[in-house]
Amino acid sequence: MENQKNTITLDTAQSWAKKWRKEEGTYNSHHEVHAFLIPKEDLIEVLEEGVDAVRAYLGVDDLNEEKLMIVGTRYDAATDTYVDMTPNKVIDAGYIYDFTRPCPPSCDSASPLNSLKTP
């Protein structure tokens, strides 16, 4: 499988997801993120993999920047589960897309969803 420029390896995705889930990677440590900007090209590419749905995973890279990683999924009627199409799986392997523009700083300051105030 050739590597797409906007994808990451399974090892990298696992590392980022693990870091997000570790104590120092909890939501409280990364509470500044409100959303992620997802490039159109990445959405088109994941949808062109013949997916039934997509799943998003949260992660933190080596520079402590929050990441949203999206993988295609295929529905397995036998288990009533959407199975990730990741490299090294028996199901047709897909790519892991790295959406690297968290908000902030990549925000729409006029968005009513971005300007929510918390008590």
Image: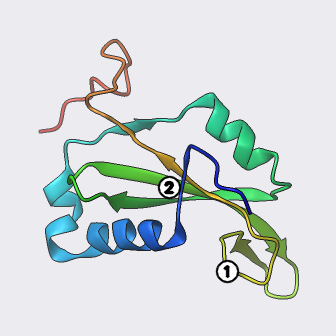
Which residue is rendered at x = 52% and y = 65% of the image? 9
Q: Quadrant of residue 6?
A: top right
In this image, 11 relative to 43: left or right?
left
Q: Is residue 98 above or below residue 84?
A: above
- Which of pointers 2 and 1 indicates the residue nearer the eye? 1
In this image, 34 relative to 81: left or right?
left
Q: Position of residue 37 (x, y in %)?
A: 45, 32
Is the residue marked by circle 2 packed among few (<14), some (14-19), or many (20+) residues within 10 Å?
many
Pointer 1: what residue? 88
- Sequence order check: which comes first, mark 2 or mark 1? 2
Q: Position of residue 75 (x, y in %)?
A: 82, 71
Identify the amino acid type marked 1. Asn
Quadrant of the frame with the C terminus: top left
Element class at badge 2 = strand
Which residue is rendered at x = 42% and y = 38% of the image? 36
Pointer 2: what residue? 69
Element class at badge 1 = loop
